[in-house]
Image (cartoon, grey):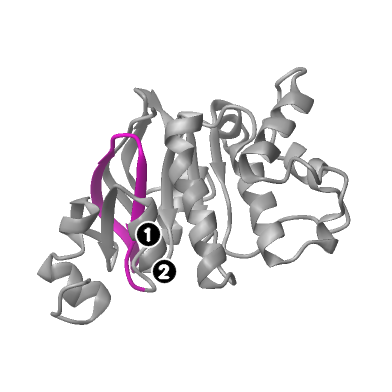
Amino acid sequence: MTEVRIEGLTVRYGGVVPLDGVDLTIDGGAWGLIGPNGAGKTTFFNVLSGFARPAEGRITVDGEDLLSMRPHARARWGLRRTFQTEQAIRELTVADNVRLGYEHGRRGGAGEAVAAALDFVGLADQPHRLVGSLDMRGRRLVELARAVVGSPRLVLLDEPAAGLPDQESEELGALIRAVPERLGATVLLVDHDMALVSACCEKLAVLDFGRLVATGPTAEVLQDPLVLAAYLGTTEEVA
């Protein structure tokens, strides 16, 4: 699985510093990135996906310089991302939406890749259905399929279960948890649903005011007093 090494990552917008000297190594598997609103999580995703440039620092992915790649080159390399708001195009079919996630520049194989992604999320029997006719759960599954179609190496998921009830969130979480093992991709998940994060992620990184305040196995990080104070706003242990 892909290793992501971040060194001294700093982003400045005038006097605002949403990321301040972040050092982090994501060593494969499923990771959660958590923190309060304004902690720098979205900026972190924007830098990784090429929508923001850091003032300082470097990022390597399996030894390659990620920051030297343009966004479309990162997609070809295998970086995928979902967003907080729905991105699925309701006027297109399920299969056509997923096909849009198939990286630019690859010749042939799209049909097989789309079919495999739909099978992974449980939509193999609905490729020709219009996305607009799906419920929220179905549309979220389409977005996950678009993020894992082809051969992803690094999958960034930004609140992928937003709007789903608990049971459907758990079902989506089981799929996310399976991505590293079944597809060989490293996953970085941002979500405020701590039950989902705990169920999906082996390790966590915690941002607070742009700084990395904790990292490590999920159970240990969630009992860290600094995390409890900064993120959860309590000194009580998380069950």
Q: Which residue occupies the extreme top position in the image?
A: 107
On residue 193, the disc is 2
Q: What stretch is highlighted in magenta?
A: 16-36
Q: Which of 103 and 9 is in front in this view?
A: 103
In the rendered image, residue 237, in percent from the top left (x then y), is placed at 15, 74
Query: Can I make out residue 14 in this image?
Result: no
In the rendered image, residue 163, in percent from the top left (x then y), is placed at 59, 72
What amino acid is at disc 2?
Asp
Residue at (50% x, 71% y) in the render: 166
* Helix, strand or loop for disc 1: helix
Query: Can I make out residue 149 in this image?
Result: yes
In the rendered image, residue 134, in percent from the top left (x then y), is placed at 78, 61
Q: Main secondary structure of the magenta part?
A: strand
2 and 1 marks in contact (CB < 8 Å): yes
Quarter the N terminus occupies:
top left
Quarter the C terminus occupies:
bottom left
Task: Work out whether 196 lies above or below 118.
Answer: below
Counting every numbered tag in the picture gives: 2
* Circle 1 crowding by C-alpha within 10 Å: few under 14, some 14–19, many from 20: many
What residue is shown with label 1?
197
